[in-house]
Image (cartoon, rainbow, N blue to C red):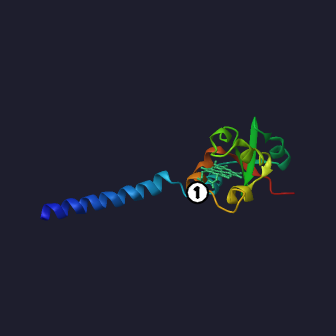
């Protein structure tokens, strides 16, 4: 009986540690992009430069003040490409946060953003 209780206790602790590790290491918190931006020396990208990358061969988007190059991700996005392409070259915060119909992207989607980060959108005009 004691051995059974000990085994159950160890299994329980192992489960808690596994979940904690998963949350800490694999599911990156949503604010990860902003934190990464603080740490990295990102170059400033003008709105004119952003606007030039408005097509499938070079698709940049600004989300929450940061600029991302999503060119390689468009074929991976789980919708027809037109959903993503519509926002290339544009300020796309609202589109990203609502998916176009009022529902936010998942934490898993948020965690992908840092992989595509290329700069910070200029703040003047
Ligand atoms: C900025 C314009 C974007 C729009 C309008 C948009 C819209 C959508 C729509 C309509 C869906 C499918 C329906 C649904 O899951 O509710 C979806 C799913 C998804 N999108 Fe986007 N998306 C955008 C950008 C992005 C970006 C930049 C990423 C990641 C780098 C991304 C990652 C995903 C993922 C992983 C899913 C699966 C569901 C989820 O995890 O939320 N999307 N998006």
Residue at 41% over, 55% down: 21
Residue 76 quadrant: top right
Q: Residue furthest top?
A: 57
Q: Quadrant of the N terminus?
A: bottom left
The image position of residue 28, as x and y in percent, is 53, 54
Q: Badge 1: how crowded within 10 Å, few (<14), some, or many (20+)? A: few
* Residue 82, visible in the rendered structure: yes
The image position of residue 93, as x and y in percent, is 73, 57
Residue 17 to residue 42: above or below: below
Q: Is residue 106 left or right of residue 97?
A: left
Residue at 77% over, 52% down: 121
The image position of residue 105, as x and y in percent, is 62, 57
| Label 1: element kind | loop
The image position of residue 100, as x and y in percent, is 72, 57
Q: How many marks?
A: 1
Q: Quadrant of the C terminus?
A: bottom right
Residue 56 quadrant: top right
Quickly name the residue at label 1: 106
Work out whether residue 119 or residue 89 is closer to the camera in this orientation and state it. Answer: 89
Q: Is mark 1 within 8 Å of ligand 1?
A: yes
Q: Residue furthest left?
A: 1
Work out whether residue 34 or residue 39 is closer to the camera in this orientation and state it. Answer: 34
Work out whether residue 9 or residue 124 is closer to the camera in this orientation and state it. Answer: 9
Q: Is residue 91 left or right of residue 97?
A: right
Q: Is residue 13 left or right of residue 37?
A: left
* Residue 43, visible in the rendered structure: no
Work out whether residue 74 or residue 40 is closer to the camera in this orientation and state it. Answer: 74
Residue 52 quadrant: top right
């Amino acid at each position: 009986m004691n051995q059974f209780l000990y085994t159950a206790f160890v299994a329980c602790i192992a489960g808690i540690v596994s979940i904690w590790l998963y949350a800490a290491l694999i599911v990156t918190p949503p604010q990860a992009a902003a934190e990464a931006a603080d740490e990295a020396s990102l170059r400033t990208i003008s709105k004119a430069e952003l606007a030039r990358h408005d097509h499938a061969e070079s698709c940049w988007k600004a989300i929450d003040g940061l600029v991302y190059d999503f060119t390689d991700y468009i074929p991976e996005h789980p919708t027809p490409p037109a959903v993503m392409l519509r926002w290339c070259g544009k300020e796309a915060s609202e589109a990203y946060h609502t998916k176009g119909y009022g529902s936010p992207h998942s934490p898993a989607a948020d965690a992908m953003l840092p992989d595509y980060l290329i700069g910070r959108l200029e703040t003047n005009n």
